[in-house]
Image (spheres, rainbow, N blue to C red):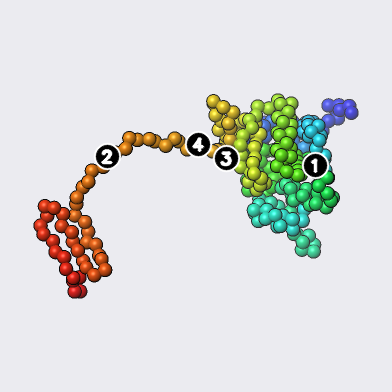
């Protein structure tokens, strides 16, 4: 397709917009890549859409290369699967919810684990159908309390999500390793300075989680790394080792005789008399 600048829908800005907080947001607006439509929502203009499509194709190509199959789930989802999984309550105010004309509750999808699981449950009838990995590039929604930084923290965003279905832990580890390597190739092809760090699974769940973080001065996550090895972790997921126990030479104990408080037995009150103290008494309990 031949795209002529004379016919291109392009409007640039001379000055920084007042609501643009970070450099990426200012540049995207001034260069005519995006246009603000609502708080946390942006219209992709032709130049921006071309870039977005190129990035999407890089991601799609790497996933297809490792055997993933692309699907496309709806963005408007029924509430029941998310109530069953418990994530309707876990997400709380972070999701957009609505009811149709019949009163049935729905949500705008923040992620699609439940739908992918129901799809495989509906279609697969034998263990021979496994393993399989599905992926999609789909619009997601999150009810951000304070959208900020342009595309970095919006209420509507494009996300790639993949779901592997395996017969055993060995298959799960293999799928994880394949996707980890694919993500490295994606970040390398995009020329990003990134780090792979341990992370918390959060509402997504799972026994392990890693994040691919691109270093930026306006990021919202902080991670730490070891200078002597390859350990790196989000500050929320840092695990530190206990310091070695302190070993001390045994202390020699000496016997010390001192007065003790009165002690009660079944029938007697007694006040022991240490050596060198005036005499004590012992006898029946005093009468109140």
Rendering coords of residue 160 (x, y %): 75, 39
- The crowd level at tag 1 (other Cα within 10 Å; few <14, some 14-19, many 20+) is some
Q: Nearer the viewer, mark 1 or mark 2?
A: 2
Q: Nearer the viewer, mark 3 or mark 4?
A: 4
**Which of the pair 255/209 is nearer the observer?**
255
Q: Secondary structure at mark 4?
A: loop
- Which of marks 4 and 2 precedes in the sequence? 4
- Which of marks 2 and 3 precedes in the sequence? 3
- The crowd level at tag 2 (other Cα within 10 Å; few <14, some 14-19, many 20+) is few
Q: Work out how far the residue at label 3 is from the one at label 1, CA to CA, in angstroms.
A: 30 Å
Q: Is residue 192 left or right of residue 5?
A: left
Q: Secondary structure at mark 3?
A: loop
Q: Which mark is residue 237?
A: 3
Callout 3–callout 2 Cβ contact below 8 Å: no
Say which residue appears at 67% left-offset and 38% top-offset: 152
Q: Name the residue tied to disc 2.
A: 252
Q: Name the residue tied to disc 1.
A: 132
Rendering coords of residue 42 (x, y %): 73, 41
- Which of marks 2 and 1 precedes in the sequence? 1
Q: Is residue 197 above or below residue 85?
A: above
Q: Name the residue tied to disc 4.
A: 241
Q: Work out how far the residue at label 3 is from the one at label 4, CA to CA, in angstroms.
A: 13 Å
Looking at the rendering, in which quadrant would you find the N terminus?
A: top right
Q: Work out how far the residue at label 3 is from the one at label 2, CA to CA, in angstroms.
A: 44 Å
């Amino acid at each position: 397709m031949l795209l002529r600048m004379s016919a291109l829908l392009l409007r640039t800005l001379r000055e920084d917009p007042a609501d643009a907080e970070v450099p990426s947001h200012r540049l995207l607006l001034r260069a005519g890549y995006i246009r603000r439509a609502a708080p946390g929502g942006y219209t992709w203009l032709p130049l921006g859409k071309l870039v977005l499509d190129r990035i999407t194709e890089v991601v799609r190509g790497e996933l297809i290369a490792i055997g993933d199959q692309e699907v496309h789930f709806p963005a408007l989802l029924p509430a029941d699967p998310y109530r069953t999984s418990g994530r309707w309550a876990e997400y709380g105010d972070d999701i957009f919810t609505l009811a149709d004309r019949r009163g049935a509750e729905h949500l705008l999808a923040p992620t699609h684990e439940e739908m992918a699981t129901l799809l495989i449950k509906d279609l697969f009838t034998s263990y021979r159908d496994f393993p399989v990995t599905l992926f999609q590039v789909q619009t997601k929604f999150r009810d951000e309390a304070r959208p900020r930084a342009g595309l970095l923290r919006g209420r509507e965003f494009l996300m790639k999500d993949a779901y592997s279905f395996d017969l055993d832990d060995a298959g799960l580890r293999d799928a994880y390793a394949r996707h980890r390597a694919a993500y490295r190739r994606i970040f390398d092809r995009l020329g990003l300075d990134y780090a792979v760090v341990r992370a918390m699974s959060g509402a997504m769940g799972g026994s392990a989680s890693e994040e691919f973080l691109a270093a930026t001065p306006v990021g919202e996550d902080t991670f730490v790394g070891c200078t002597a090895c390859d350990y790196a972790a989000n500050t929320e997921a840092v695990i530190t080792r206990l310091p070695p126990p302190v070993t001390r030479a045994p202390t020699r104990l000496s016997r010390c005789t001192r007065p003790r408080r009165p002690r009660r037995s079944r029938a007697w009150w007694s006040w022991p008399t240490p050596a060198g103290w005036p005499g004590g008494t012992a006898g029946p309990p005093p009468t109140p």
